[in-house]
Amino acid sequence: MVGRKSRELPSVLSQARERFREWRQKRQPKTRIPEPLWTLAVQLAGVHGVCRTASVLGLDYYALKKRLAAAD
C-alpha cells in the first residue's frame, strides 16, 4: 500500500507547474518552451525523476530525458 506522503506533490514541482501553466496561457501558438523553463525542468528531473517531472509539467518524457542526459 502506497502511503499518502509519497503521492503528495512537492512544493517545488507545484510551483514549476504553475510557471509552465502561466507561460502556456500567455504564449503565441507553436512557440517553443523558453530555455529557462527547460533548465528548471531538467533540474527538477534530476531530483524527482524524469517520469514524474514530465507528467506534472506536461512535457514530453523523451525530450526531457534527452535534455537531462545532455546536462550530465
Image: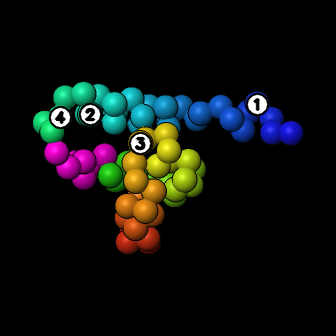
Q: Estimate the x, y position of residue 34 in percent, counting from the top left.
A: 22, 48
Label 3, label 2: how far apart the Cα atoms are? 10 Å
Badge 2 vs badge 4, beta-carbon distance below 8 Å:
yes
Task: Give the number of the mark in front: 1 or 3.
Answer: 3
Would residue 31 appear left or right of 22 to someone viewing this image?
left
> In this figure, which residue is indicated by the disc labeled 3?
58
Amino acid beneath label 3: Gly
Under tag 1, what secondary structure? Answer: helix
> In this figure, which residue is indicated by the disc labeled 1?
4
Q: Estimate the x, y position of residue 39 in percent, counting from the top left.
A: 34, 53
Label 2, label 1: how far apart the Cα atoms are? 30 Å
Badge 3 vs badge 2, beta-carbon distance below 8 Å:
yes
Would residue 65 appear left or right of 34 to someone viewing this image?
right
**Secondary structure mainly formed by the magenta segment:** loop
Amino acid beneath label 1: Arg
x 19%, y 29%: residue: 26
> In this figure, which residue is indicated by the disc labeled 4?
27
User: Quadrant location of residue 16?
Assistant: top left
Task: Give the number of the mark in front: 2 or 1.
Answer: 2
Residue 69: which disc? none
Q: Which is nearer the N-term, disc 3 or disc 2?
A: 2
Under tag 3, what secondary structure? Answer: loop
Up-down: is 47 above or below 8? below
**Closest to the observer: 59 or 39?**
59
Q: Is residue 3 magenta?
A: no
x 47%, y 49%: residue: 54
